[in-house]
Amino acid sequence: MFNKIMKQFLLNKFPIFILIIIVLFIIIFVDSACNVLPKVYEEKEKPENAEYEEIIYLPEPETVGEMSLEETIKKRRSVRSFDDKELNLEQISQILWAAQGITDEKGHRSAPSAGALYPLEVYVVKKDGVFHYKPEGHKMEIILKGDIRKKLKEICLGQQWVEDAPVDIIITGIYERTTIKYGDRGIRYVYLEAGTACQNILLQAVSLGLGAVPVGAFRDNQIQEILNLSKDETPLFVIPIGYKK
């Protein structure tokens, strides 16, 4: 009797059961497709400059060097003739840390800043692209692919050492970060801070066995254009760095 009831049940309900299974399968398939297809579309539509999001985490900087501060001051000279030998990541890390690196748990940086407002931004120009230094996390992110050193040389009024150096450091300032507290006087504070950061870079270069030279002759607006900076971000220094030829 039981078997007869079950058989009758299956005959009556089995088609409905199969239909439910098919509907569930369709729902699951459509849901999966909805999750996958947008990703495929995003990848196809991803712009060529998507690699700009690339982050390079820098090696920890050294805080004890082989050369004394007094010796680096004595040996510092402007160098305008560079070998084509590349700088390694440890050297670049040390230079960036000297410029604007964080030096304590409170977030203070290597160069003094009026009101700890930190108006400076630092960029690294190499043969493989332009990188923006991020003091938080001691890292740099690529903002532009390719070698712009020849173009940068032209912007710097034809100063050949800008193109020859394996690395050019560009320091910019955003005045508003400081003037919002100090008014027009803040502009002077930004210049003072930029000069301090530049000297830190020059001395650090010497301690690493490198040469460098501060460059101040360039067309501000063209550096803003080539780095895609806002008009509020003013170029203050270009600093070629490398092994002395």
Image (spheres, helix red, strand yellow):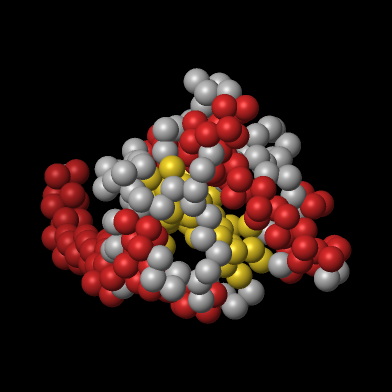
Q: Quadrant of the N terminus?
A: top left
Comparing 54 with 229, the one in front is 229
Q: Position of residue 172 (x, y in %)?
A: 58, 62
Res. 182 image quadrant? bottom right
In the picture shown, does residue 85 fall above or below 217? Answer: above
Q: Residue at x 64, y 74 (%)?
A: 232
Left or right placement of residue 108 versus residue 26 in this view: right
Left or right placement of residue 240 versus residue 221 in this view: left
Comparing 4 with 17, the one in front is 17
Comparing 192 with 88, the one in front is 192
Residue 185 visible in this rendered orientation of the protein:
yes
Q: Residue at x 19, y 51 (%)?
A: 5
Comparing 6 with 39, the one in front is 39
In the picture shown, does residue 167 fall above or below 33? Answer: above
Q: Position of residue 219 (x, y in %)?
A: 51, 76
Q: Position of residue 19 (x, y in %)?
A: 20, 66
In the picture shown, does residue 29 fall above or below 230? Answer: above
Q: Residue at x 53, y 69 (%)?
A: 217
In the picture shown, does residue 148 fall above or below 72? Answer: below
Q: Residue at x 62, y 27 (%)?
A: 70
Res. 111 image quadrant? top right
Res. 48 image quadrant? bottom left
Q: Position of residue 77 (x, y in %)?
A: 51, 43
Left or right placement of residue 194 versus residue 91 in this view: right
Left or right placement of residue 169 versus residue 30 in this view: right
